[in-house]
């Protein structure tokens, strides 16, 4: 297990504090920031976790990343690549050897075939893959529909790509799946893109095959391009097989499949992801990537080859461990009286706290101040997350047990 990022950030902020801050600026910078950037708020998660810095007594269920260090064979591949002196740029698209492994993996896991020479782009995480996808597709004013609560960067990424963000609220009773009839209501003549993420951050929600088929039908009828963020797709539980919308009839040609190494392979710090799509779309995305990023880091690409060739076993072990923790933690939350659906994937529990009569900010703040447990207020993931709390259970088992006991004590004080 590795130290969490809260600790890393703490030491960084101590270093910053030791340096004198520059004088107050004389220029009015607010007039110089591009409108679409000024329009975007800072991430609610980061703001919340500023409060946690410097507190040693806090159990963090906050940051959404694996608590495992990257498996040793993958780290070793990175080390050996450096030892061999592989420190150069790669092709803009990424190492061909990696793209071949990706096409092979995606073909096997998602049941969709891509040509490694022209239909795979290696990026700096799914984060960059999402950004280049949106920038490649959107003209100013184009609408992007996505289901909410959702990953914090979706709405800002759309806005910064000059698009219009159109969230569709999902519900606990539907497992936070996107219902085709709700999607249909959000489609307008300006709709261009549908952005999906199953399993979902922050809800752990999954979509049934039936829902995906209904969604696919609408995409085809309304000529939408679908961007599907598959970053948690290996982290499915209860022996359920993951289905990507890209594999449904008529969808491959209109889908950009985003995936990466951060979650399933515990490689967040390697910053590596990829996009698979028909060649003309990859070509457009590659232009943005080429001029802004040039290529993904070669050391990370070498590690990723190893992850795809020999990373299945450690990945399965990590998944099994999350599964056990999910079962324990969700059961405890429900015992405590926090209504929590059973998340079918990812590593987040998303309990409903509405019956306690507090906003999600106040609930999370009270929990942090009185019991030293940090969880993210649901409204950080969009207005429809209000009334919920995101708890990342990729946390050591004894810490999870302790967190559940502390949450129980806090809830008892709410009457
Ligand atoms: N997409 C979702 C749904 C996420 O939850 C995250 C990270 O938490 C990302 C994308 C970013 O992933 P990456 O580390 O590959 O940039």
Image: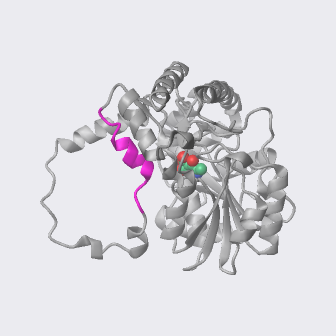
Q: Residue at x 60, y 37 (%)?
A: 349
* Depth check, front residue: 128 or 345: 345
Q: Position of residue 125 (x, y in %)?
A: 55, 51
> Does the image show residue 372?
yes
341 sits left or right of 80 in the view:
right
Measured as percent of width and height from the top left, residue 73 is found at 59, 29
Q: Which residues are magenta?
A: 41-54
Q: Is residue 332 above or below residue 5?
A: above
Q: Give the camera-side residue of 228 and 148.
A: 148
- Residue drawn 49% across the image and 26% down it: 412
Can you tell which quarter of the image residue 184 is in? bottom right
Q: Is residue 408 or residue 263 the one in the foreground?
A: 408
Residue at image point 50% right, 69% down: 159
Query: As drawn, is 350 to the left or to the right of 409?
Result: right
Tell whether 371 sits left or right of 412.
Answer: left
Q: Position of residue 65 (x, y in %)?
A: 53, 38
Q: Nearer the viewer, residue 162 or 355?
A: 355
Query: Which residue is painted at 40% across and 36% down in the image?
Result: 366
């Amino acid at each position: 297990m590795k130290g969490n990022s809260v600790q890393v950030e703490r030491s960084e902020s101590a270093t910053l504090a030791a340096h004198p801050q520059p004088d107050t600026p004389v220029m009015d910078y607010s007039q110089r920031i591009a409108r679409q950037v000024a329009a975007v708020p800072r991430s609610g998660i980061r703001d919340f976790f500023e409060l946690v810095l410097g507190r040693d007594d806090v159990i963090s269920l906050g940051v959404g990343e694996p608590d495992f260090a990257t498996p040793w064979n993958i780290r070793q591949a990175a080390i050996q690549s450096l030892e061999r002196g592989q420190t150069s740029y790669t092709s803009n698209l990424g190492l061909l050897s990696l793209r071949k492994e990706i096409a092979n993996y995606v073909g096997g896991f998602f049941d969709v075939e891509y040509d490694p020479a022209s239909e795979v782009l290696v990026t700096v995480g799914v984060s960059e893959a999402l950004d280049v996808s949106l920038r490649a597709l959107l003209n100013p004013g184009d609408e992007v529909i996505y289901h909410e609560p959702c990953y914090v960067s979706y709405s800002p990424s759309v806005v910064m790509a000059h698009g219009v963000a159109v969230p569709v609220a999902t519900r606990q009773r539907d497992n936070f799946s996107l219902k085709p009839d709700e999607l249909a209501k959000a489609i307008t003549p300006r709709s261009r893109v549908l952005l999906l993420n199953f399993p979902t951050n922050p809800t752990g929600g999954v979509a049934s095959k039936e829902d995906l088929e209904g969604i696919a039908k609408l995409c085809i009828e309304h000529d939408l391009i679908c961007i599907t963020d598959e970053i948690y797709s290996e982290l499915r539980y209860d022996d359920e097989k993951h289905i990507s919308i890209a594999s449904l009839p008529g969808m491959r040609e209109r889908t950009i499949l985003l995936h990466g190494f951060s979650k399933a392979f515990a490689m967040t710090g390697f910053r590596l992801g990829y996009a698979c799509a028909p060649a003309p779309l990859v070509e457009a995305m590659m232009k943005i990537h080429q001029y802004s990023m040039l290529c993904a880091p070669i050391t990370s690409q070498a590690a990723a080859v190893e992850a795809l060739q020999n990373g299945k076993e450690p990945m399965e072990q990590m998944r099994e461990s999350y599964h056990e923790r999910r079962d324990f933690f969700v059961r405890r939350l429900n015992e405590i009286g926090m209504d929590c659906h059973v998340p079918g994937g990812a590593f987040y529990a998303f309990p409903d706290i509405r019956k306690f009569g507090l906003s999600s900010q106040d609930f999370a703040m009270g929990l942090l101040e009185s019991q030293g447990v940090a969880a993210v207020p649901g409204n950080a993931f969009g207005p429809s997350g209000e009334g919920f709390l995101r708890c990342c259970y990729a946390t050591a088992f004894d810490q999870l047990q302790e967190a559940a006991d502390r949450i129980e004590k806090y809830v008892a004080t709410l009457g």
